[in-house]
Amino acid sequence: MFKVHFLRILCFLIPSLSTFSSNSSKLNFNPQKAIDFWNYEVASYCAPSYLTIWDISTISAASPNVIDIEVIQNETTQVFGYTAYDADKNLAYLSFRGTISSITDWMNNLDMFKEPITTYCDGCEVHSGFWKNYLSIKDNVKDAVLRIKEKHQDAEFAFIGHSMGSALATFAFIDLYEEVHPDYFYTFEMPRMGNKEFADFMDANFQDILKVRITHYKDIIPRGPLTSMGYYHFKNEVFYSEDCSSYVICTGDEDPSCINQFSLLNFSINDHRTLFGINMHEFKNTCN
């Protein structure tokens, strides 16, 4: 079961950041927010020296009043994220960077043994490498999120992440859900991160917010680890066409109408790096 939405949008190099509407439902997908959140996410690939002063080329030019930036990182595990507040939108957020192709990152990504997480649900198991990465910064994440939430109590709040960072954002979302009461949870190009019990746990809980998994055309990363290895995605997938001119919302588990329609032999790495006209792999060269 799925429903189809078509959106014609211009894939500008750096789309302008629009004002968030307070009337928008947390249960409805908002394509403009997806573009806005991707811009914030691309910024997470920049060096702290650029990020903390919000000197992020055209992204900071389009959204000039991002303040109270706090970097969260563990140099051993290479986990990196940040919290910030966009004064123009009255939005605070937590963003996690994905893999940057360091040896440590790839070793953790390849650590695909599953770790039991009984604090979430009976039978829940998650990707061991992702879980270890999250534990390496868990306390710092909580402190940073609660600090910015306390400072901007009336602001909306978003959890966002890309690639491996999507898994980290998911763990943070679960752990801080009751304390933060987030308004948005948007991830980009998330790999499968847990077993069927974990996917069912995510689907059955947090019903007052739409949990968005954005995928892009033939990206290979959301296709792994394989279901044959006992890994499954949770809902809901928003699948974008190659040129970002349309999207499909698939509400079923592992829906063949979205990214699963492609053969595992028919994939593109560039689709993992690019959304809405912004290639984060190329863009990060301007701020590192």
Image: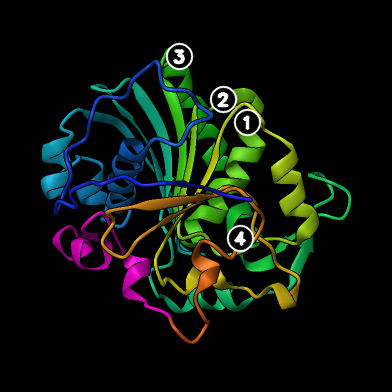
Query: What is the quadrant of residue 240 in the picture?
Result: bottom left
Q: What mark, if any, has residue 153 been given in the picture?
A: 3
Percent coordinates x, y for residue 63 in the rendering: 18, 34
Percent coordinates x, y for residue 122 in the rendering: 89, 49
Q: Earlier in the sequence, mark 2 or mark 3?
A: 3
SS type, badge 3:
loop
Amino acid residing under circle 1: Tyr
Q: Which residue: 70% across, 72% down?
A: 227
Q: Is residue 21 left or right of residue 135?
A: left
Q: Which residues are magenta?
A: 267-288
Q: CA distance from mark 2 to mark 4?
A: 31 Å
Q: Residues within 10 Å of mark 1 (few under 14, many from 20)?
A: some
Q: Nearer the viewer, mark 3 or mark 1?
A: 1
Amino acid residing under circle 4: Asp
Q: Is residue 38 above or below residue 76?
A: above
Q: Earlier in the sequence, mark 1 or mark 4?
A: 1
Amino acid residing under circle 2: Val
The residue at which mark 2 appears reads as 180
Q: Are marks 3 and 1 in contact (CB under 8 Å)?
A: no
Q: CA distance from mark 2 to mark 1?
A: 5 Å
> For residue 176: magenta?
no
Q: What mark, if any, has residue 177 been given in the picture?
A: 1
Q: Nearer the viewer, mark 2 or mark 4?
A: 4
Q: Which residue: 26% across, 55% down?
A: 46
Q: CA distance from mark 3 to mark 1?
A: 15 Å
Q: CA distance from mark 4 to mark 3?
A: 38 Å
Q: From the viewer's side, name the closer residue of 26 and 242.
A: 242
Looking at the image, the residue that sits furthest to the top is: 154
The residue at which mark 4 appears reads as 255
Q: What mark, if any, has residue 98 been given in the picture?
A: none
